[in-house]
Image (cartoon, grey):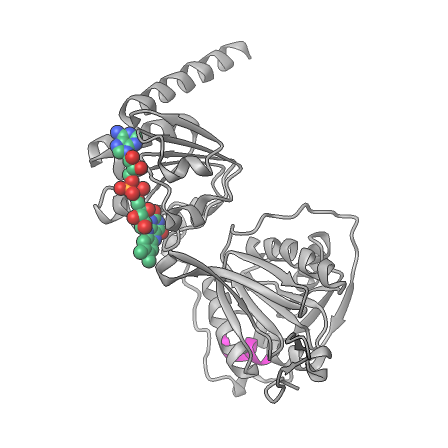
Amino acid sequence: MNAEKAAPRKSGRGKVELDERLKAYHGVWVFIEHERGSVHPVSWELLGEGRQLADKLGVSLCGVVLAAPGLRARHFCEEAFFHGADSCYLMEDPVLSSYRNQPFTKGLTDLVNAYQPEILLLGATTQGRDLAGSVATTLKTGLTADCTALNIDMENRSMAASRPTFGGSLLCTILTLNFRPQMATVRPRVMAMPDRDIARRGTIIEHPLGLIETDIVTKVLQYIADEQQDKPQLPFADIIVSGGRGLKNADNFQLVWDLALVLGAEVGASRPVVQAGWVELDRQVGQSGKTVRPKLYIAAGISGAVQHRVGMEGSDVIIAINTDPNAPIFDFATYGIVGNAMTVLPALTQAFQQQLATAKMAG
Ligand SMILES: Cc1cc2nc3c(=O)[nH]c(=O)nc-3n(C[C@H](O)[C@H](O)[C@H](O)COP(=O)(O)OP(=O)(O)OC[C@H]3O[C@@H](n4cnc5c(N)ncnc54)[C@H](O)[C@@H]3O)c2cc1C
């Protein structure tokens, strides 16, 4: 069943009441994305977020695994329990051995129609974006892409999905009031990774796909490893030193590399730096770049515009270096250094170098 014909009703107080058919939808689901035997970490991050949504609604949290038959698929379900799921829907079929839009869309829409979750979350990855779009259009429901925050609007039991809009200058919150499930995608590292509790157990609910290879129009002929895999993995770095336009030129940007080398950190940048060609696009942090969540983020000569902020504000500790004491980055940095980055960066590099040398000598 889909909610295509369901219409909202207004009560006397103007509050939207959920149609009876929408009320039949229950529970929060997270699609467990995997490729070549590994689950994408965004799935665990979404289970952490999904747990909070499910608890607010007083419903269960379920993982959804679509995979080729085998021990691996069951292991993914087990991991989903460790990361907060109460149960896991498992669809096993040989045609699900590699991701293809057609069988995965059929599998996920069949499961939704059979078990009716009220919320369905997917990672805003290449696979998640491809699948979420076709599942939402097949089910004729609403999808909010690239969310930066998810919550529950308790007045009408709806998911409040927030995301940047108007070129990132505003944040909007979108509610899908008339259709179910409410779907959202979230980029990796936007949500925190939940603790892994190996004592948690759950129930596996199996469901058949009912599709054969000759029904599928696309074939996987060969797997070609992503050439990008050796490129910087900013989203998963523990320490990032980032530079902005305040560094003035590519030669000064070398100071960022110097500090990063000493700290064993990745190098990030704001968009003007990438546009000026001082570093490659893979290093851009922000709304149109990478979302990062390191333990330490050092921002030198970066103003803290909202489009940069959305990509790094989940960092545990932010140290900002800026000549302007009123720069927006000081509003959300953990520590602020008002000063010239061309002086502060080499001083930090030297201080850390000395500290590391002393620590090495001591033991
Ligand atoms: C649709 C859209 C998407 C965008 N996506 C992104 C994105 O993904 N990532 C991103 O970063 N931006 C993005 N932007 C651009 C964003 O709006 C800002 O323009 C950009 O983040 C500013 O970069 P910046 O802080 O390096 O430069 P500026 O805003 O020019 O700031 C430079 C800072 O350096 C300080 N400074 C100057 N000299 C020194 C010095 N010697 N030492 C220390 N500090 C100094 C200045 O006080 C200033 O605060 C996007 C914009 C749009 C419209």
Prevailing SS of the magenta stretch: helix
Vertical comparison of 11 with 265: above or below:
below
The residue sitting at 21% across, 36% down in the picture is: 250
Vertical comparison of 163 with 5: above or below:
above
Q: Quadrant of the N terminus?
A: bottom right
Vertical comparison of 180 with 312: above or below:
below
Q: Name the image quarter holding residue 345.
A: top left
> Relative to 244, is 1 on the left or the right?
right
Q: What is the total number of numbered labels drawn onto the structure image?
A: 0
Q: Is residue 101 visible?
A: yes
> Relative to 170, is 295 on the left or the right?
right
Vertical comparison of 92 with 295: above or below:
below
The part of the chain drawn in magenta is: 100-106
Give residue 220's position: percent from left, percent from top.
46, 73
Q: Is residue 240 visible?
A: no
Q: Is residue 26 magenta?
A: no
Give residue 344's position: percent from left, percent from top.
33, 22
Q: Quadrant of the C terminus?
A: top right
The residue sitting at 41% across, 58% down in the picture is: 170
The residue sitting at 69% across, 47% down in the picture is: 196
99 and 214: which is toward the camera? 99
Give residue 255's position: percent from left, percent from top.
29, 28
Spot the residue most to the front: 12
Give residue 351's position: percent from left, percent from top.
40, 16
Where does ligand 1 appear, by image quarter?
top left
102 and 242: which is toward the camera? 242
The residue sitting at 62% across, 75% down in the picture is: 181
305 and 183: which is toward the camera? 305
